[in-house]
Amino acid sequence: MAGGDVLEMINIDKRFGGIHALRGFNFSCAAGEVHVLMGENGAGKSTLLNILGGIYQSDGGEIRINGKAVQITNPIVARDNGIAIIHQELSVCKNMTVAENVFRGAFPVKPPFSFVDYPRMIQDTQDLIDAARLNLDPEAKVGRLSIAQQQMVEIASAISKNANIVVMDEPTASLTRHEVESLFEIIENLIQENRTVIYVSHRMEETFRIGDRVTVMRDGTYVGTKRTDETTTDELVAMMVGRDIRDAYGTRTFTGTKEKALEVRNFSNAKLKNVSFDLYKGEILGFSGLVGAGRTELARAIFGLDPRTEGTIKVEGKRAVINTPADAIRYRIGLVPEDRKGAGLVLNQSISFNLTIGVLKSFIHGIRVDSNQENAIVDRYRNILSIKSSGPDQKCKELSGGNQQKVVLSKWMAIDPEILILDEPTRGIDVGAKKEIYDLINRLSAQGLAILFISSDLPEIIHLSHRVMIMCDGEIVKEIDAEQEELTQIKIMNYAIGRDEDGGNG
């Protein structure tokens, strides 16, 4: 990390009517650093970025660029001061080429008639792409590019306008792991050029991977700034929520019975090898392992999404034939999938549509929909899960990640399940929403629901699960009962990578 503050935001204040969105907020970042900005949904991150980008005007405070006070009254002034903001919802024009997007608003022209100099624009774009080591074709239509490539276009555009401060708002939300790695390489290149990257994220792994410092905000206020090599996940979470993260998980108490809700025997397919286990009523059964270990594949096979070559299922002691999701639902099994946006929701439809799609038949009488019954179900689960929205008709694509996940959970709760499979239920949501989902999981377990809980977040697995199954290469390699044996991250990881508890080869 290089020195010298290039940006200072001092005592920034912003109100929207009676809502005090920012309260004397302070923030600064240095040249050549990745500075992570963290906070729960509603903490004020978006408001702060919009003030920096000239979309909103602050009601008080001062912004300094390289020590000089500036008035950022609109996005053009922000651009002229070397600030580029790459929003989560990208602003590329999809019917234009990469080169046209990069130089949009500042096309190179040929004198004397000021026609656009296309050959120069394409060559200048190629030079930018080469310098930043981006994998782009200047003449490609942006609408045909992946989300990751469209982000690269915005980064190239920022560089073309000499941006020294590049703000990235949740840039990995829609990227694959490979694309995330490519983005990190691009960020490292920007830092090597002594540019500043402000990286807005709530993903701890990314924060510690690429961040030099992290600033936490809560309820529009500045909480603190830490060097990433001098802090921990628990400390940052406590700063965000105002309490110790261990309090968020609740108390793990098994109130269920030893009555089996689900029995899986000898499950095998291309990804699974002879998987067998029991799940009891009222139990939270955690499944841990590395990516590709077979946890998601197991969930999909149980739910009838993927075929199996061998294996049987019993539900409440009786043989169950589950070859499709419809079969699973008949046995009152629900699945909250890993990819809530792609597989869990119809994003362009309303909360009401998504929440009731699994129970639609129950309030259709002939050709008439009993809207009173439908509304009662929607209102019930909106209240139970505290879904924050403008109303039941709001489209799911407009909701935060946490509220989208609550809609998915509500959809399955509405079928009154006996068994609920949760695949990465807190991935990509803020800490406050995680706490609400932890509370719900504990509450459902206490009510006797059998929960199969898949998570890559080891503290979640350790603090919520009654038992843990650890998978490696499609097999269950270890079962740990939390009541009988201490659960630790090191122990879980050793088994997950194919070693025994002490770190030797298993």
Image: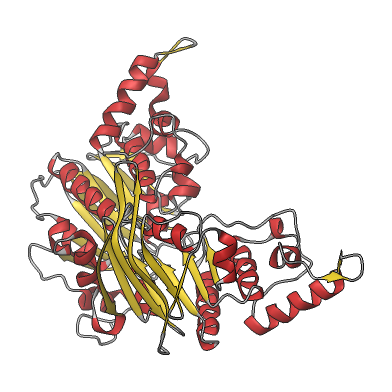
Relative image position of residue 299 (x, y in whole percent): 37, 52
Instruction: Report the front residue among 452 and 145.
Output: 145
Q: Residue at x 19, y 42 (%)?
A: 444
Relative image position of residue 75 (x, y in whole percent): 56, 60
Relative image position of residue 65 (x, y in whole percent): 46, 76
Does residue 72 lie above or below 281 as drawn? below
Q: Is residue 408 left or right of residue 488?
A: right
Does residue 295 lie above or below 63 as drawn? above
Is any part of residue 484 visible from this angle? Answer: yes
Does residue 79 lie above or below 355 as drawn? below
Instruction: Report the front residue among 42 and 58.
Output: 58
Q: Residue at x 31, y 31 (%)?
A: 414
Q: Residue at x 36, y 68 (%)?
A: 37
Q: Residue furthest right?
A: 112
Is any part of residue 471 visible from this angle? Answer: no
Q: Residue at x 36, y 21 (%)?
A: 374
Relative image position of residue 383 (x, y in whole percent): 25, 33
Figure quadrant of residue 379 = top left
Q: Quarter holding the N terminus? A: bottom left
Q: Quarter holding the C terminus? A: bottom left
Instruction: Report the front residue among 57 and 433.
Output: 57
Figure quadrant of residue 447 = top left
Q: Is residue 479 left or right of residue 85?
A: left
Figure quadrant of residue 74 = bottom right
Q: How is the image coloured?
A: secondary structure
Q: Is residue 123 left or right of residue 159?
A: right
